[in-house]
Every structure is written in C-alpha cells, then in structure tokens.
Image: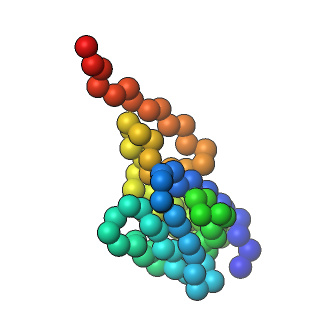
Amino acid sequence: MEAQFFRFLKIVGVGYKARAEAQGKMLYLKLGYSHEVELTVPPAVRVFCFKNNVVCCTGIDKNRVHQFASAVRGCKSPEVYKGKGIMYIDEVFKKKQGKKSK
C-alpha cells in the first residue's frame, strides 16, 4: 500500500501518550482518563507514532484518512484555556484569557 495522503496529529498535555500496535491497525491513547482509549484503524488507513506525542495517519483514500484523524482528535479536542488535547500539526490555535482578578 503506497500512502499518498497524510494527517499529522500532535498530543499536548502532561501524561498524554499514544502508541500504535498490530502493524498500524490499533491505536491506544492515554488522555488522562481512568482507562486507555482504544481505536481500531479502518482498512486502507495506517497509523504510525513518532515519539509519544505525534501520530501520523496515512492512506490512499483521503476521505478515510481525514475522517479517522478527526475521530482521534474528537477523543480529546483542544481545550481553549490550557491548550491541552489533540490537535492537528498545522492547526492554528488561539488560547483564551482566563478569569481576571480585581
């Protein structure tokens, strides 16, 4: 399978990790929940983990690659105040200002 489409995801947060197993067909995410999040990768999509915090979704079908990447991002979408969560590498993310004290 020759991968033509890529989608990179960055995981930001203390203790947040990702690992791929079974030749890129299973993705395990530690996102601060009491359990690991297990995602089964659909056919025609492969997943690779660079380090612990960068996930690469590749495949020959653009729609499936982007749909799976959005499903991974939906597990822990970026938080607007602290900036923790899963975001795309090329995503521009603007943090909000917290509550002001007098």
Residue at horizontal 48 percent and vertical 74 percent from the top: 28
* Image height of 6 relative to 85, above or below: below
- Image spot of residue 52 (x, y percent): 59, 63
Residue at horizontal 58 percent and vertical 59 percent from the top: 53
* Image height of 2 relative to 86, above or below: below
The answer to whether residue 56 of the structure is visible from this angle is no
What colour scheme governs how the chains and residues are painted in the rendered image of this protein?
Answer: rainbow
The answer to whether residue 76 of the structure is visible from this angle is yes
Q: Quadrant of the N terminus?
A: bottom right
**Depth check, front residue: 93 or 63:** 93
Q: Quadrant of the C terminus?
A: top left
Residue at horizontal 71 percent and vertical 70 percent from the top: 3
Residue lying furthest bottom in this view? 22
Residue at horizontal 39 percent and vertical 56 percent from the top: 76
- Image spot of residue 95 (x, y percent): 44, 32
Residue lying furthest top in this view? 102
Q: Is residue 19 left or right of residue 99?
A: right
Number of numbered labels in the structure image: 0
Q: Is residue 22 left or right of residue 102?
A: right
Q: Is residue 102 left or right of residue 2?
A: left
- Image spot of residue 33 (x, y percent): 34, 64
Residue lying furthest left in this view? 102
